[in-house]
Amino acid sequence: AVLAIKSIPAKRHVLVATEDSKASAERLKTQYEREGMAFDIVMVKPFDFGQLRKAFAALLETYRGQRVAADITGGTKPMSLMLAETWKSERLFYVETDVRQAIIDLSSPETIAFVREMKSVEEFVRIHSSAPFQPGRTEVTQGEGRLAKALLPFRKILGDQYTPLDNVLKRKQYNQLALRNEVENVVRALGDLQCSHSIRVMCDTVGAEQTCQFLHGGWLEVYTFLCLKDLPGFYDFRLNASVLYQRRDDDPDRSPKLREFDVAFTDGIHFYVVECKSGRVEQDYVNKVSGNARNFGGTYGRGVLVCTKERLGHSQEGYNNLCTQIDNAKNLMLVELPERNMAETLRTAIRNWKPGKWEVKA
């Protein structure tokens, strides 16, 4: 329904709903009326052929003499059959979503598929949510890029520093001195002159808080972004884009929640959300990235959880439970970066995306 609404300009849209889909239809109506579209909702009984025929005939009579079109994609089979039968003299459409997002004109002498590639992250978000979108960044500074790559060999040490950094960043009232002290603690732990100099330059340039955030995990986000941003066949790579997401009406806490994407991009068909973890990978992160992919990419949302092998931090049983949860998500892939060829492993995994744990082939 969303693809048809967005793709076919119309003065008025009519949503045919059942009791089961009434709430969803009303949400769509409210969402798109805010954007200035006119909507009606017609209630039907999904398996009553006689009632369906009357309802669709009445609709056709209402708009007699006007240019009208019917989308027969959704609903039960009786709904699709009766709509196609009743409106066979009018223009019929079918929305193809198995392979490509396309609007197929069934009334044309030759079936014509209008393929609609979406090469914009924002367009995916807009189709699935009316929430405010913050575009994030499409480039990083040379200094950030160099430091992110220089920190790779020290990822285990940074993993050990993850909890202290996490604690200082989560304090409601932290001061610059505490943040600077934590930066110096990381510098001492690294024991590398080049990295130490670069970290101190960053601290003097952008401040201790932003430097702590970079050491806390931002370095892996930047590294992942740089590995992927020139990957052929993929578009609109964004670092730290975000959406102020309105929770559902039945959520006890309905206050808007900020949903941030460490890295987001599209291949024109699918919406990819990448979550990078330099610390322990908890099951909450699985829910987060899978939910973001589903909420803002729909059926075509794909989540990628990137971590370094050392930092999974689970017992064998815990690790097996984590992998089972990822398998059950169906729209999520776990990429454990190996000791060598990290960049190529990551690029290969994205090119050959499949749900579950990505196995590095020798």
Image (cartoon, rainbow, N blue to C red):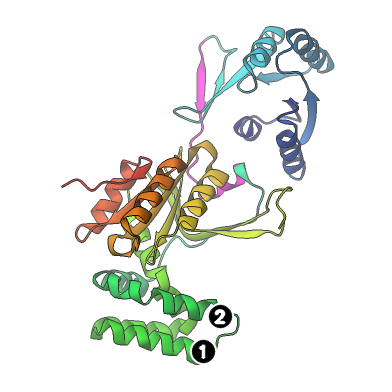
Q: Is residue 330 left or right of residue 251?
A: left
- Residue 100: x and y in percent read 46, 29
Answer whether residue 358 is magenta in the image.
Answer: no
Residue at 46% over, 55% down: 283
Going by the numbered disc 2, the residue's amino acid type is: Arg
Please state which of residues 208 and 201 is positioned toward the viewer in this rendering.
208
Q: Is residue 356 above or below residue 97?
A: below
The residue positioned farthest toward the left in the image shown? 362
Residue at 48% over, 36% down: 117
The disc at residue 171 is 2
Answer whether residue 114 is magenta in the image.
Answer: yes
Could you give the CA–CA distance between mark 1 and mark 2, rounded to whole angstroms?
Answer: 12 Å
Q: What is the magenta range?
A: 110-127
Going by the numbered disc 1, the residue's amino acid type is: Gln
Secondary structure under tag 2 reads: loop
- Residue 329 seen in the current view: yes
Q: Is residue 320 above or below residue 197?
A: above
Secondary structure under tag 1 reads: helix
Of the image marks 1 and 2, the number of the one nearer the N terminus:
2
Residue at 47% over, 75% down: 166
Please state which of residues 240 and 23 is positioned toward the viewer in this rendering.
23
- Residue 309: x and y in percent read 28, 60
Please state which of residues 164 and 98 is positioned toward the viewer in this rendering.
164
- Residue 134: x and y in percent read 58, 59
The residue that label 1 is drawn on is 176
